[in-house]
Image: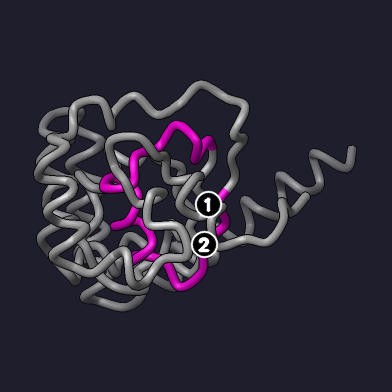
Amino acid sequence: EIAETCRKAVEALFHARVTRAYERREVGNELRYFSHTLARGRDTVGAFLNLKHSSRAIDAVLEVLPCWVASVQDVARVFPLRAGLFDVVIIDEASQCSIPGSLPLLLRAKKAVVVGDDKQLPCVEGKFVNRGYNAQLRDQHGIGRVLPRPDVFDACTASFFDLVNSFCDRAVF
């Protein structure tokens, strides 16, 4: 009974949010295009690429759908690299996320929650990073002078969890 009450409340809030958005002409037009494209079942990739390249489209969709669940790769594909695009970004399984792939998520976030476990399998993406180029970038940008432990910014051996954990005195539960 509680679950059903919650479901109805969320449904009512969503309906009200959509109705308000459609009442604003420019937002409504973007939403109609996006929903029409998805409903046809064709060119869904095109609909999402339009989001990435159209500031009006992404703002309209985020107004109606403020909460997304996506992989690091999907965020890079769909959402523009805009500072503060999201209020909160939650990065789960951060011990399996690469540093280069995860840093753009932080730019898109006003706040971030990073969840991981150093006892999990390590990030494998680092095995494909050129060690020489990685070291050159660290030196070029003075990473060794900024971080308490520069080795955790090594994209070849460290995960995003390792990097974030280096800034914490203790684990937070």
Residue 145 drawn at (x, y percent): 33, 71
Is 111 in the magenta? Answer: yes
Q: Are the two marked residues, 2 and 1, in contact with CB atoms closer than 8 angstroms?
A: yes
Q: Is residue 159 left or right of residue 104?
A: right
What amino acid is labelled 2 in the image?
A: Ala
Instruction: Give the distance between the C-alpha atoms of the residues marked 2 and 1, in whole angstroms.
Output: 6 Å
- Work out which quarter of the rendered image holds the N terminus and state it: top right
Disc 2 or 1, which lies upstream in sequence? 1
Query: Does residue 128 lie above or below 148 as drawn?
Result: above
What amino acid is labelled 1 in the image?
A: Ile
Is 36 in the magenta? Answer: no
Residue at 68% from the left image edge and 61% from the top image edge: 169
Front-most of 86 and 58?
A: 86
Extreme residue in the right direction: 1
Residue 9 drawn at (x, y percent): 72, 55
Q: Secondary structure at mark 1?
A: strand
Residue at 78% from the left image edge and 49% from the top image edge: 173
Q: Secondary structure at mark 2?
A: strand
The residue singled out by tag 1 in the image is 90
Query: Does residue 6 lie above or below 54 as drawn?
Result: above
Front-most of 93 and 57?
A: 93
Front-most of 75 and 129?
A: 129
Please identify the quarter of the rendering in which residue 41 is found.
top left
Q: Which mark is residue 63?
A: none
The residue singled out by tag 2 in the image is 112
Residue at 46% from the left image edge and 26% from the top image edge: 122
Q: Is residue 148 left or right of residue 146?
A: right
Q: Is residue 39 left or right of residue 43?
A: right
Residues in magenta, as a range: 93-114
Q: Residues within 10 Å of mark 1 (few under 14, many from 20)?
A: some
Query: Does residue 36 lie above or below 88 as drawn?
Result: above
